[in-house]
């Protein structure tokens, strides 16, 4: 039986009998495990946070229908941060101190995750972030993990593709957010390794509704391509502005572009965009031998059946977070946060939507370079880059 924690001044771990819920007609005792979630369900990052919330709720619904974890049901407590770091921190404190959750999944954005990671770590409550910035898990903190691929891996995939295409002069543009700043740092760090010179590197306001003035600078920089690193609506705006200005150099995006709604918002200006991402968006194009394919197809089908919309990589990040967490709880046979964190570090060869996770004491992301593929947009749809 899983042990459930209660806090009375300090957190004390007691037997599951303290939370008895007798299953009707069976005499079998089950207990509720509280899991916290912080997602930007509304606000500028809602294209990310809304599918994360939907995914987490669907996962828990299905898990509870199947009997929960070792007979223990899950209670998911979701807080909508609207992308605010201040709200995320307030909610993290509330979830830990008042709701006494055993772990938190999310937040949605890198800025929020960076804002709460120290509090979670100090409280010894596992945080499994759905955000991408490498600094969330580097340096490693005992109770902080994340599910998206490392920024540096994404950058290297993008740069290798540029190198293969003969690009040597690049313009880097990014939003003034934690995610944008993290990507900008990695782009500048690895450019020389691939024979690429960054001829322009500028940030813009995440709330910008027109990027024409920035693109005028790009046009005059001599860049052979531009890469945009953001998660905001600017991803679509920059594509439309480039088309309006007849700026025909290739547009690369970060893995933050992995939601078809960004393509829809950009219209035909999205065609030709190139970006590194996980395999979820092209699951049906993968060979049957791919170890992720079955999981990716099932998640995509279940999500679309439930919500009447396509799955995105962001919902996938939440799927992976709760998959890792529930796997760790099951393997630890306890909901003691310290034991959960220890179990997370021992997870190996676990297929998720972002890749095959193998954690360790020195790696709290658990994904390799092989978790990423290069994608493009063709006729308003995602496709593998380099294929006809």
Image: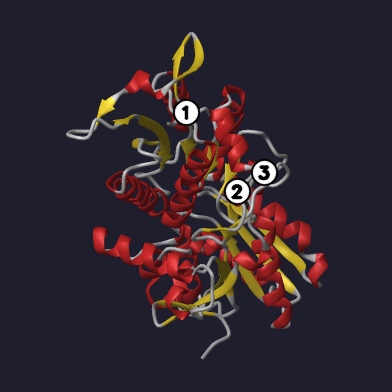
For the residues marked 3 and 2, what is the alpha-carbon distance in whole angstroms? 21 Å
Closer to us: 344 or 48:
344
Which residue is disc 2 drawn over? 347
Closer to us: 315 or 296:
296
Name the secondary structure under disc 1: helix
User: Closer to the N terminus: mark 1 or mark 2?
Assistant: 1
**Residue at left offset 69%, top offset 47%:** 363
Q: Crowdedness of circle 1 by 10 Å Cα count: few (<14), some, many (20+)?
A: many
Location of residue 237 in the rendering, given as x and y in whole percent from the top left corner: 45, 63
Residue 328's mark?
A: none
Location of residue 71 in the rendering, given as x and y in whole percent from the top left corner: 35, 38
Determine whether 166 is above or below 308 in the image.
below
User: Closer to the N terminus: mark 1 or mark 3?
Assistant: 1
Please give left or right for residue 231 compared with residue 194 in the image.
left
In this view, the residue farthest toward the top is: 9
Name the secondary structure under disc 3: helix
Name the secondary structure under disc 2: loop
Which residue is disc 1 drawn over? 92
Please give left or right for residue 160 compared with residue 67 in the image.
right
Q: Crowdedness of circle 2 by 10 Å Cα count: few (<14), some, many (20+)?
A: some
In this view, the residue farthest toward the left is: 25
């Amino acid at each position: 039986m899983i042990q459930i924690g209660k806090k009375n001044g300090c957190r004390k771990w007691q037997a599951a009998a303290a939370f008895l819920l007798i299953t009707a007609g069976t005499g079998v005792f089950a207990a509720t495990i509280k899991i916290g979630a912080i997602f930007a369900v509304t606000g500028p990052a809602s294209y990310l946070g809304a599918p994360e919330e939907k995914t987490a709720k669907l996962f828990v619904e299905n898990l509870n229908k199947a009997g929960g974890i070792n007979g223990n049901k899950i209670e998911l407590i979701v807080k909508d941060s609207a992308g605010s770091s201040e709200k995320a921190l307030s909610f993290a404190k509330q979830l830990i101190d008042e709701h006494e959750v055993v772990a938190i999944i999310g937040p949605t954005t890198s800025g929020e995750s960076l804002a709460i990671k120290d509090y979670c770590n100090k409280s010894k409550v596992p945080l499994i972030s759905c955000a991408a910035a490498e600094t969330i898990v580097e340096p490693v903190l005992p109770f902080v993990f994340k599910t998206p691929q490392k920024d540096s891996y994404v950058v290297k995939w993008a740069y290798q593709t540029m190198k293969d295409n003969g690009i040597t002069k690049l313009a880097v543009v990014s939003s003034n957010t934690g995610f944008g700043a993290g990507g900008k740092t990695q782009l500048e760090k690895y450019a020389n390794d691939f024979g690429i010179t960054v001829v322009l590197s500028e940030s813009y306001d995440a709330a910008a509704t027109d990027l024409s003035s920035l693109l005028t600078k790009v046009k005059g920089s001599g860049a052979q391509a531009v890469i945009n690193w953001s998660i905001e609506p600017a991803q679509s705006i920059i594509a439309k502005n480039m088309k309006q200005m007849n700026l025909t150099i290739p547009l690369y995006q970060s893995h933050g572009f992995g939601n078809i709604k960004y393509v829809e918002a950009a219209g035909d200006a999205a065609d030709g965009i190139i970006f590194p991402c996980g395999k979820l968006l092209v699951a049906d194009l993968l060979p049957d031998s791919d170890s992720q394919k079955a999981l990716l197809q099932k998640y995509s089908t279940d999500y679309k059946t439930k919500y009447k919309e396509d799955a995105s990589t962001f919902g996938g990040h939440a799927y992976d977070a709760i998959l890792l967490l529930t796997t760790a709880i099951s393997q630890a046979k306890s909901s003691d946060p310290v034991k959960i964190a220890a179990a997370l570090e021992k997870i190996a060869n676990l297929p998720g939507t972002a890749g095959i996770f193998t954690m360790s004491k020195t790696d709290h992301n658990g994904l390799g370079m092989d978790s990423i593929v290069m994608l493009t947009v063709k006729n308003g749809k995602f496709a593998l880059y380099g294929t006809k």
